[in-house]
Amino acid sequence: MSVTKRKAHEDAMTYVIIGNGVASIGAIEGIRRHDQKGKIVVIGAEDSAAYGRPLISYLLAGKIGANQLALRGDDYYVKNNVELKLGTTVTKIDTAKKAVTTDKGDTVAYGRLLIATGGIPFIPPIPGVQGEDIYSFTTLAHAQTLIELSSKIKRAVVIGGGLIGLKAAESLHDRGVAVTIVELAPRILSAGFDEKAGALASNRLKKVGIEVNCGVTAKEIQRDKKGRVKGVLLTDGRFLETDVVVVAIGVVPHSAIAKDAGIKVERGIMVDAKLMTNAKDVYAAGDVAQAMDQLSGEHRVVPIWPNAYNQGYASGRNMAGAKEPYQGGLPMNSISFYGLPTISVGVVNPPEGDKNFEVHALLDEAKETYRKLVFRDEKLVGYVLVGDIDKAGMFTAFIKFEMALAGEAKDKLINAGPEVFLWPEKLFDETWNPAPAKAAR
Amino acid sequence: MKRVYPDKDYCIGCHICELACLTAHSKSKDLILAYTVERGSEGLTSCKHVHERGPTCVALSCRHCDEPACVAACISGALQKDSESGRTTYDREKCVGCWSCLMACPFGAIARHPLENKIVKCDLCADRPGGPACVAACPNQALKQEER
């Protein structure tokens, strides 16, 4: 083979992954399950190897050190034959030439490309939001900035009572900062929780001294003559004095380079069952992708950790030619507030008055426990657990495997909890004690 | 890889596998000390759990899935798939106790440690020369470790 021919052959075999988060790790592992040889190039904008992004709240809280953040071992990239280009941003994708250009001026040719650029913090157009003393909390760099800052400030306002906002609030509180949370919705964690679960979590936060304000948001961030933040004026007229504001409304897909390349983007980058975009050999996964959701059958952006890994993995194995479709995402969150564990999976807030859904909820305020089960068409489609979470996975099974629950089985699930003997015989046998040829899965 | 397969037609619900698991993962490696002392002082917990309904019972633990949901959900990298051994491995030091794995594993094979923010999960007795203690202890061969 001539040198140019060999180069062309190598390029055609090269997997390029833009982004170095958990979707990227999933992709490496999905590729390597089917292709041990093909070269993988990972281009990441951040400086560090893939880290547990949700761990930044543990870092900010001082519960773990920076040396505990890496998602995989030191030899991981070498062992998997992955070339890492860190601190490097892709500026352009050329789907015709099958190459990407970086801000360092390099051109990297690909055979298969994965866009796993994740999300970027959404900053709402509040007057005064541009300028000093405004922070986000989605990257290691953000956490390091806030750690440095925490010894110099007394008060912080966190805008947004979702997962990121609450974790930022808790961690800053642990660093001795007086924190106030402001949430537009009538409860915290409005996406994954209902009123009762939200109230339990919010009571726990209030108990330790974090102020929680729901049903209001920031109308204006006011600044002094030097441009430093003075405080936040709320929609109900109150004024909260503060040194800094953490904006944690959520993340939006970081899809600009895909859009520029003519790749179809709705809310996120649209992908098919193989996680491929409308451009041949270009795939997308994780918080940037709009992929199939198992329960609704619709394409949605669901920026959660397990979906990102699973989409990365599914895209990886399909890039490597395995032709195994993505099974669809399932919204799920597990998070603890000062020792109060909470888990929510699937559809937890069915549309009000929709007769297709049946809800069974059980609250014990004294014990701080809550259990909510949501059924649709005699199947479990969602649940919330607060306090007593030990059977979570067994509940997840009924949703994930879409097990039909007729009469008695459903009563048992509601009254006695999930149990493996409620599974259909066939699923049980295939899962736990399969005939030898069917074992591997 | 060789996995442990439970057969409910043979399980007699004696819980000896649970005790064998306790002992194998104890400091003392002594059944009585493991049960009477370490369960309380160390929060020693069996990875194996016997499920019962009427006369039917079966002993379940981590399946060491080829594509584990717990690894996908793990935010710290404590749970990983070892491509060489096939095991789903758990690094206790890395674990922050977020319970994502416990939520994601549809086989209910992950438990919370009773005293610490850590999990308890079958390691297939990786350090035990004779292989999984539960398999060795089962009096009715209801647990088999096999390549299937």
Image (spheres, helix red, strand yellow):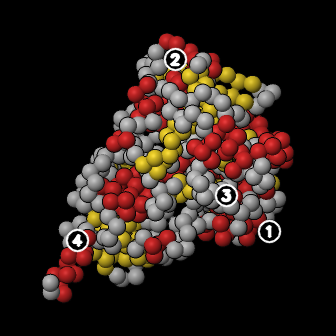
Quick check: do tags 1 and 4 share a chain?
A: yes
Badge 4 amino acid: Ala
Residue type of the residue flagged with mark 2 = Ala
Q: Residue at x 58, y 43 (%)?
A: B135
Q: Position of residue B59 (x, y in %)?
A: 58, 35
Q: Nearer the viewer, mark 1 or mark 3?
A: 3
Q: Given the current orientation, which residue lies at the most extreme front position?
A: B139
Tell which of B55 and B49 is nearer to you: B55
Q: Is residue A219 visible?
A: no
At horizontal 71% and vertical 63% (from top left) the residue drawn is A64
Which type of secondary structure does the marked residue at label 2 adopt?
helix
Residue under label 3: B92
Which residue does the image show at 48% across and 60% down from the upper left? B85
Which residue bears the numbered disc 1?
Answer: A152
Question: Which of pointers 4 and 2 indicates the residue nearer the eye?
Answer: 2
Report the residue marked by disc 2.
A409
Disc 3 is placed on an element classified as loop
- Spatial separation of the CA atoms under disc 4 and disc 2: 53 Å
Between label 4 and label 3, give the one nearer the viewer.
3
